[in-house]
């Protein structure tokens, strides 16, 4: 009887020790759905049928807070079609890190939203898709309307595990308002 009690206590102690072991701090799991740090957004508009390229930039080298971003005004021709490309940089690093490749590699977690206000200024259509056939928006087509002024909001939605082709799920990695002039 004493032997059975000793074995029971030893098993109980062993199981308790097994389940209460301390975790080594080097084993911490880091979430893979964190938002990227993006300090600079560069938009390239190439007029269809030409080699005319117009580049516009928004830069906030110190990140959120601190100094406000410096953002170019976008000026495009009226009633014209453009190919659009975007480049994303993290200039808090030396040399600056190109985040565009990471967004492309994790395209199933990202969606660019281009919203003109008023809407008639510019219509954007993404021309790239992820493995689930949802738009990405790293490259696309923009068609301008008649001469007017307004804003172009460019958002990069981080949608890890929730991407459904709409802007609703997720959080913003980028949210930039460009002044937009169609002439």
Image (cartoon, helix red, strand yellow):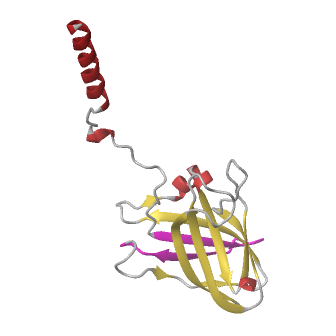
For residue 82, side relative to residue 64 (left or right): right
Please tell me whether the stretch drawn in magenta is mainly helix, strand or loop.
strand
Count of labels in the image: 0
Decide: is 149 above or below 109: below
Q: Nearer the viewer, residue 66 or 99?
A: 66
Q: Is residue 19 above or below residue 69?
A: above
Q: Provide residue 109's location: percent of width, then percent of height.
A: 58, 54
Residue at (42%, 75%) from the top-left corner?
A: 60
Q: Is residue 59 magenta?
A: yes
Front residue of 47/68: it is: 68
Residue 62 vertical position relative to residue 16 in the rendered view, above or below: below
Residue 45 relative to residue 59: left or right = right
Q: Residue at x 57, y 66 (%)?
A: 156
- In x, y percent, where is residue 40? 47, 70
Q: Quadrant of residue 37?
A: bottom left
Magenta residues, start to end: 40-62
Q: Is residue 106 magenta?
A: no
Dividing the picture into quadrants, the one containing residue 154 is bottom right
User: Measured from the top left, where is residue 177 in percent x and y?
Assistant: 56, 81
Residue 133 percent location from the top left of the image: 73, 52
Residue at the far front in the pictured view: 1
Q: Which of the two residues, 79 or 32, is positioned nearer the viewer here?
A: 32
């Amino acid at each position: 009887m004493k032997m059975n009690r000793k074995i029971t206590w030893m098993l109980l102690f062993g199981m308790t020790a097994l389940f209460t072991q301390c975790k080594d701090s080097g084993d911490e799991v880091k979430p893979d759905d964190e938002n990227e740090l993006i300090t600079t957004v560069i938009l390239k508009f190439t007029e269809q049928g030409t080699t005319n390229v117009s580049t516009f930039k928004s830069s906030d080298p110190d990140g959120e807070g601190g100094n406000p971003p410096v953002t170019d005004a976008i000026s495009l021709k009226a009633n014209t079609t453009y190919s659009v490309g975007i480049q994303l940089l993290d200039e808090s690093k030396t040399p600056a890190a190109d985040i565009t490749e990471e967004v492309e590699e994790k395209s199933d977690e990202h969606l660019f939203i281009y919203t003109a206000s008023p809407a008639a200024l510019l219509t954007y259509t993404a021309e790239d898709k992820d493995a689930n056939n949802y738009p990405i928006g790293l490259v696309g087509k923009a068609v301008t309307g008649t001469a007017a002024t307004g804003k172009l909001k460019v958002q990069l939605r981080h949608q890890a595990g929730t991407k459904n082709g709409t802007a609703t799920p997720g959080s913003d990695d980028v949210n930039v308002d460009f002044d937009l002039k169609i002439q």
